[in-house]
Image (tube, rainbow, N blue to C red):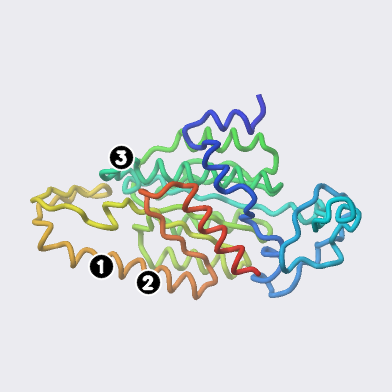
Amino acid sequence: MSGGSSVLDSDCIDAATLEEVSGLELIARGAVEGARIGRHRSFLSGLSTNFTHHRAYVSGDEIRHIDWRVYSRSERYFVRKYEAETNYEAYLLVDASASMTFAGSHGLSKLDYAKRLAATLAYRIVEDRDSAGLAVFDDELRGLVPPKGSKNVLVDLVRELNRAENSSRTEVGGILTQISSRMKRRGFVILISDLLTDEESFLSGIHQLACAGHNVIVFQVLDHDELTFPYDQSTRFIGLESDYEVVVEPGRLRQEYLDALGGMIDRYRVNLGNAGVDHVLVDTSESVGAILASYLASRSLAQV
């Protein structure tokens, strides 16, 4: 059984979700060695003579890479892709700390959602002939799959995701530093976390990755109930990463809570934006396919 077919049998990924994001590139051509990194076009583009496949022309592609023979047959524009252009590496970082186990009224925990999101992203990356790797963490690195471009890596990724269980507090900043030290050349880092962590340490890790020339995307995954605070009766709240418990009247706390949460999200959005990092707020009540399709379409429009 091939890597592609076996992962479709996993709870982490499904064909319907893949259909929603088909045809959209996560790793935009030229993004790693181009616009964001050094603000110049990739010197690798077109240098390799090892042709691999065609890709539909998009605004911004150099005309000299259009395959005019294909155009003469199809009257559609395609650019030729070479091995040197298709060897970007992307690390998917999945937060498996205790806070990620929260599941509100919709039933799916943030961790299970993160697994599905990571698996779908990995599938799309490998489909685009780039390399995908995985790191599962809490306050330590718990599982690692080095980046590979073969579809067989998807089996390893899904196996590691299925092993992921909550075990401790979150320490995102230190993990980002570890991943940065493992990456020997510029690539993509895709973080999937609720970001309920030390903000200063986290942003320090982000800046380290950005200064090293990596493209970073942050998916901040929050449960719909966390985003809306729908409780209307006296409720006991239990800390997932501490022994703290408190009984509150939601009506008295709701606005203060929503203001604090909104402030945290806004700080992340602004600080990450200033570092050239994409921040994607994920509501677990929305499907993985819808979230990714919306985000990838917005990236495509931004690059036109």
Question: Pointer 2: residues within 10 angstroms few (<14), some, or many (20+)?
Answer: few
User: Based on the displayed image, in which of its 4 quarters is residue 282 positioned?
Assistant: bottom left
Question: Pointer 1: residues within 10 angstroms few (<14), some, or many (20+)?
Answer: few
Report x, y in % for residue 172. 43, 56
Tell which circle, 2 or 3, labels the residue nearer the N-terminal end: 3
Looking at the figure, which quarter contains the C terminus? bottom right
Report x, y in % for residue 273. 49, 72
Element marked by disc 2: helix
Tell which circle, 3 or 1, labels the residue nearer the N-terminal end: 3
The amino acid type, in three-letter code, at marker 2 is Arg
**As drawn, is 267 to the left or to the right of 14?**
left
Point 13% across, 48% down: residue: 236
Q: Is residue 46 above or below residue 6?
A: below
Tell which circle, 2 or 1, labels the residue nearer the N-terminal end: 1
**As drawn, is 119 to the left or to the right of 97?**
right
The amino acid type, in three-letter code, at marker 1 is Ala
Q: Is residue 7 above or below residue 47?
A: above
Looking at the figure, which quarter contains the N terminus? top right
**Label at residue 260:** 1
Residue marked by disc 2: 267
**Label at residue 107:** 3
Question: Pointer 3: residues within 10 angstroms few (<14), some, or many (20+)?
Answer: few
Which residue is more in the foreground, 67 or 47? Answer: 67
